[in-house]
Amino acid sequence: MKQTHATTDSSPNPPTLIVVCGLPATGKSSLAEELRDALGWPLFAKDRFKELLYDSVEPDRDAFTREESTVIGKQSIALLLNVASELLRTRISCIVEANFLPHMGPTDLAPLLAISRGRQVHCSIPAELVLERYRKRANAGERHPVHVDDGAEAELVERIESGGGAPLPMEVPLLEVDASDGWNPNLAEIVAFCQS
């Protein structure tokens, strides 16, 4: 566990921001939901915002493209960051979950970390298992249509090969979670890290 303590909030009891991140299909959404239930803190997940935005306009599913999905994904991140900022400014701790890109996530999250105690929980599994789970999820046909999994695997492979599955380079305490088979460390230890 990397322990680097840095926050620009000088108040005695700043709220906590938990950033749950990792590549797609690494279990981060499931872990974020378990943390929400264990901590009792609001959770803002990129995919949930993305699905709500899609449903609000009901686009033509047959004509909906990967490019349009990417645009809605960017809008979802903007909403996620805005809502989390409002809560943190009222001193309410919260959890954000997304497959933040290492070259963009730190910049996007910097304003939130300036008003909170940040904690990064990074989910990881071996690359071959990422792809196996991703294919299984895409082939199941149960994903919301906003995600447009067709053609996305090549992007995921490129991201894995370029090191895009690494933790976000942020000066906050980091906990690496192996999600290959449950959680390692276990949920109680992850919760303790979030509360530390």
Image: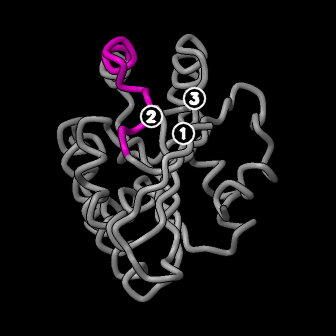
Residue 167 sits inside the magenta stretch: yes
* Residue to which mark 2 is pinned: 167
> The disc labelled 3 sits on which kind of residue?
Ser
Q: How many labels does the image show?
A: 3
Name the residue rendered at 56%, 73% in the picture: 42
Disc 1 + disc 3, Cβ < 8 Å: yes
Camera-side mark, 3 or 2: 2
**Camera-nearest residue between 65 and 18:** 18
**Percent coordinates x, y for residue 51 in the rendering:** 40, 58
> The disc labelled 2 sits on which kind of residue?
Pro
**Percent coordinates x, y for residue 94 in the rendering:** 52, 70
Label 2: element kind: loop
* Residue to which mark 3 is pinned: 124
Disc 2 + disc 1, Cβ < 8 Å: yes
Q: Distance between the residues labelled 3 and 2?
A: 9 Å
The stretch in magenta equals 157-170
Q: Residue 122 carries which label?
A: 1
